[in-house]
Amino acid sequence: MAVVLLLLAGCGSGSGSDSTTATDAGAAAGPAHEGGNAAPEERQGGTGAATDTRVDQRSIIYTGSLQVKVDDVAAAARRAAATATRAGGFVGADQRRSSDADAVAELQLRVPADRFYAVVEELADLGVQQQREINTQDVTEESIDLDARITSQRARVESARRLLERASSISDLVTLENELGRREADLASLEAKKRRLTDLTALSAVTVTLVGPDASIAEEKNEIGFLVGLRGGWKVFLTSMTVLLTVLGAVLPWLLVLGVPLGVLWWLRRRHGKRRPEATPVAPLVTTPPPAAAPPPEGGAPTPVPHTRSSS
């Protein structure tokens, strides 16, 4: 068990990086030479091999966009789709607006990289070209790095599988199965990135916008001046009034249902308050002094007067 875990630690120490450990390198050497397929590392790097810098050997992603004014947007869209199909590509997306003279159609085309510029020229000939933008991204180094990492990760997966076959206990089996699953997941992620990169380099993306004769998307973009500002302000004013009237229309039913009864109740309450009689003022209390003591009868004792405590 200790030997297996030691080998596993040596194999897994470099699983998150591009370098390969001695154990994984030895495991990768066997399958690579047995199948006669050890060329990837020899072609991609090393002291005796240099990366091919020719344009036709590099991985380049082409993306382009152009805007063309045409007389018939629907017919021009069909021709654009046919151009992509003839070049070996396809239509990835198709968005259209109305069918009048101000119609607009936007097509996203995927065409082979070697036919990219030819397709762009054919699309520009559909009418009057108004805009064109072409971008390129060289991903040669990224592609080579992915190839090296995939080869290294495959070697790690094979190494973990061989260790799994020699597992002698349940704990070793569980540990090696978890490690193998993690390595296979990393390999699948790298292969998915490679497929995505290959798809972007093999099929270039071209976005063509076809506008009718009355559409003026490109012409109004850079207009400045007093009249342009006045036209923009008038549009904003109309939009604001439309929003205000919309809100008023939404609130008006609630005002009729709740506002009218509440207004009537308020008016009745105010009218009832005006008719209420004024309160009669209360006269102040007048305290009378206590009666004086009656004189005592002759020969008798005086009549006592009850003593009252005055409140302060």
Image (cartoon, rainbow, N blue to C red):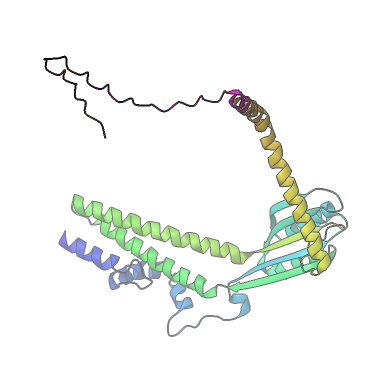
Classify residue 119 as left or right of residue 38: right
Range of residues picked out in magenta: 270-293
Q: Residue at horizontal 75%, vertical 65%?
A: 66
Name the magenta segment's main secondary structure: loop
Report x, y in % for residue 18: 38, 71
| Image quadrant occupied by the N terminus | bottom left
Classify residue 228 as left or right of residue 265: right
Q: Is residue 46 above or below residue 182?
A: below
Report x, y in % for residue 249: 71, 37
Rendering quarter of residue 104? bottom right
Residue 292 lies in magenta, yes or no? yes
Classify residue 277 as left or right of residue 186: right
Query: Is there any visible trace of residue 105 in the rendered image?
Result: no
Classify residue 29 as left or right of residue 78: left
Q: Residue at horizontal 70%, vertical 68%?
A: 116
Report x, y in % for residue 247: 68, 41
Q: Residue at horizontal 24%, vertical 55%?
A: 175
